[in-house]
Image (spheres, helix red, strand yellow):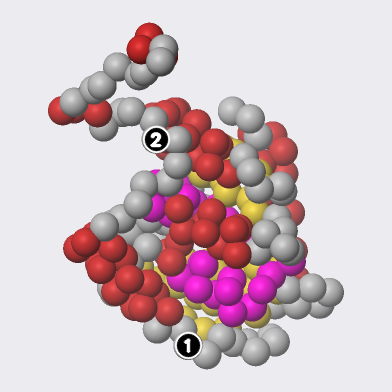
Amino acid sequence: MDFGAIPRPVFGRAAQHGQPTHPPVMKGKAAARHRKAARQAADLCPDLPGMGEHCHCMMTGFYDLAQVVVDVARRVKPRALRIATLCWNKRNVVDLTGLLEERAGDPLPLTLLASDFFAKHNKDLVEWAREQFQPYSGVRLASARSHCKVVCYDLGPGDGLVFEGSANLRTNRNREQLTIIRDRETHDWHATWIDRLVSDGEGK
């Protein structure tokens, strides 16, 4: 055994910055809270708007927008998913990689755009996320000078679903408004500027 190859253990505050090689596993109360939050997220909009319709929602539960995003993606099975947010956390990455894993037989192109401020102040977290997304083709992770919170589901020719709201991908336990729009033109307008910012900022 090469004892020199064993990583040096870290404890206390230093341990918080160690980079796991796989998504953390939630156990006990944390897992139960996450399941409860997922149920609340799924109940936010049980009936999605039809073509040309929109609906307004108020997020009042202690759940992440990421959980709403994943729940809806499972229901509508988009051809591509684009997310613009100020910030995200490890739990959001775990939820998104879970969705990507479910779609392994039908790879889902995923774009995740965050703010430059977030990326510059969370370099270890961003690098960890890149490692988690690496096995999945079609994932783009980037940052830009953006404060936008938008989610675009490409549902095929003439069809698209868009989230516009105040919530970041991760929760901050505030009330957040969310408008869900079923309109291809609105989808394409958002998708165009998101793709442009990602092309400019990819790899930062």
Residue at horizontal 55 percent and vertical 37 percent from the top: 130
Q: Residues within 10 Å of mark 1 (few under 14, many from 20)?
A: few
Reply above or below: 81 against 52. Answer: above
Residue 6 % position (x, y)? 36, 18
Split into 4 quadrants, where in the image is the N terminus? top left
Q: Which residue is mark 1?
A: 46
For badge 2, the amino acid type reads Pro
Split into 4 quadrants, where in the image is the C terminus? top right
What's the CA distance linking mark 1 and mark 2?
35 Å
Residue 65 % position (x, y)? 42, 64
For badge 1, the amino acid type reads Pro
Q: Label 2's element?
A: loop
Span of residues in magenta: 68-93
Reply above or below: 177 against 83. Answer: below
Residue 20's disc is 2
Residue at horizontal 39 percent and vertical 35 percent from the top: 20
Sequence-first tag of 1 and 2: 2
Residue 185's disc is none
- Based on the picture, tell me whether residue 71 belongs to the magenta stretch: yes
